[in-house]
Structure formats: C-alpha cells, structure tokens
Image (tube, rainbow, N blue to C red):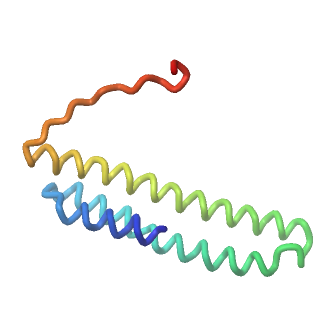
Amino acid sequence: SSDEVTRLAKELAMECTDKRMRTNLLSVCERIPTIGTQLKILSTVKATMLGAQGTEEDIEATEMLVGNAQNLMQSVKQTVTAAEAASIKIRTEAGIKLKWVRKQPWYQY
C-alpha cells in the first residue's frame, strides 16, 4: 500500500547522510499519501455515479480516475528512484562495494 512505500522511504531517508538525497527522497514520498487519499475518495464518488449519468460524464470520470492513478504511479516511481540512489549512497559510505552486472535480456533466455 502507499503507506508502506512511504514508511520505508522515510526509514531509508533517515539513514542517508547526504542531505540533498534525503531531502529529495522525503519530498517525493510525501506526495504518495495525498494522491492515494485523493484516488480513494475520487474512486468512491465516481463509482456511485458511474452509469447514473450520460456516457460523456462516465468517460470524464474514468479519465479522472486514470489520471489520478497515473499520478500516484509516477510518485511511486520517483520515490523508488530516489530510494535507490540513497541506498547506494548508504552502502558506499558503509564500505560496501557494488559491482553492477548487466542481466541477460529476457529475449535471450
């Protein structure tokens, strides 16, 4: 759920020593609960109205739901990207060396 993503991102941010990365991670993860709540409210309201109105209103309601869901997904993606950067920084400072190995593409299996 969105609460779990936010909680994990905040925990990771508190471990990160780079102030810019920490601030970035906290700012992107703060949007998730707000957008998640908007999506819940919007889906509840629109679900009760769906089919009761004309098709134009139904299309508009569907577009609003899709747009809100896309915003939520974009915020989650930004949080994951910022969390990945912060976790690399944490591991590097802890003396853990990373070696990036490219995975074989799915079409070559």
Q: Quadrant of residue 46?
A: bottom right
Farthest residue toward the right?
54
- Horizontally, residue 54 falls left or right of residue 76, namely right
- Where residue 84 sits in the image (x, y, percent)? 31, 48
- Where residue 104 sits in the image (x, y, percent)? 43, 23
Count of marks, rendered view = 0
Q: Residue at x 76, y 69 (%)?
A: 61
- Horizontally, residue 75 falls left or right of residue 43, namely left
100 lies above or below 1: above
- Horizontally, residue 33 falls left or right of residue 81, namely right
Q: Residue at x 92, y 71 (%)?
A: 54
Q: Residue at x 73, y 61 (%)?
A: 63
Q: Quadrant of residue 66?
A: bottom right
Q: Nearer the viewer, residue 96 or 56?
A: 96
Farthest residue toward the front?
109
- Where residue 27 sits in the image (x, y, percent)? 34, 65
Q: Residue at x 46, y 59 (%)?
A: 75
